[in-house]
Amino acid sequence: MEVFRLIPEKKCKFITLIRETLESTYVSVKILQRLAGKYVSFSRAVPKLFKLFTREMNTAISKGLPPQKAIL
């Protein structure tokens, strides 16, 4: 059996970041990228829920970034 625990300090920082994001009227791409990274690192705790949120955040991030040129 595999067990995954969130470190209490990281859990508190994560919750604080989510609350700040939900309370603000504007969310930068940088903040969305931080949240998406945290969701990915915590994905083992609740895989299906985090997969949904990560997909939606990545969509929002892609809309917020300027168009990228192809790298040759």
Image (cartoon, rainbow, N blue to C red):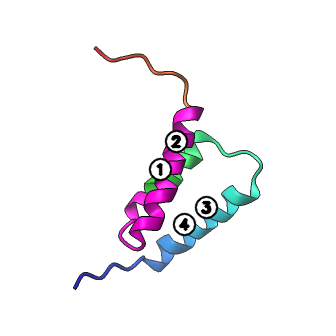
Please name the amino acid that badge 3 sits on: Leu
The answer to whether any part of residue 10 appears in the image is yes
Please name the residue that numbered disc 1 is placed on.
55
Q: Nearer the viewer, mark 1 or mark 3?
A: 1
Q: Could one spot residue 42 in this view of the protein?
A: no
Q: Secondary structure at mark 3?
A: helix
Residue behind mark 4: 14
Mark 3 crowd level (few <14, some 14–19, many ≥20, 10 Å Cα): some
Image spot of residue 10 (x, y percent): 48, 70
Nearest to the observer: residue 51 or residue 32: 51
Amino acid carrying label 1: it is Arg
- Disc 2 or 3, which lies upstream in sequence? 3
Percent position (x, y) of residue 15? 59, 69
- The question of residue 61 being in magenta is answered with yes
Q: Few, some or many C-alpha atoms within 10 Å of disc 1 (few <14, some 14-19, many ≥20)?
A: few
The local secondary structure at tag 2 comes to helix
Q: Are marks 4 and 3 in contact (CB under 8 Å)?
A: yes
- Earlier in the chain: of badge 1 and badge 4, it is 4
Q: Which residues are magenta?
A: 38-64
Q: Nearer the viewer, mark 2 or mark 3?
A: 2
Quadrant into which the N terminus falls: bottom left
Tell me if mark 4 has few (under 14), some (14-19) or many (20+) residues whose alpha carbon lies within 10 angstroms of its own. Answer: some
Which amino acid, by three-letter code, is at mark 4? Phe
Residue 59: numbered disc: 2
Mark 4 or 2 closer to N-term? 4
Q: Are marks 1 and 2 in contact (CB under 8 Å)?
A: yes
Marks 2 and 3, how far apart at CA: 19 Å
Residue under numbered circle 3: 17
In the image, residue 51 sits, relative to residue 33, either above or below, namely below
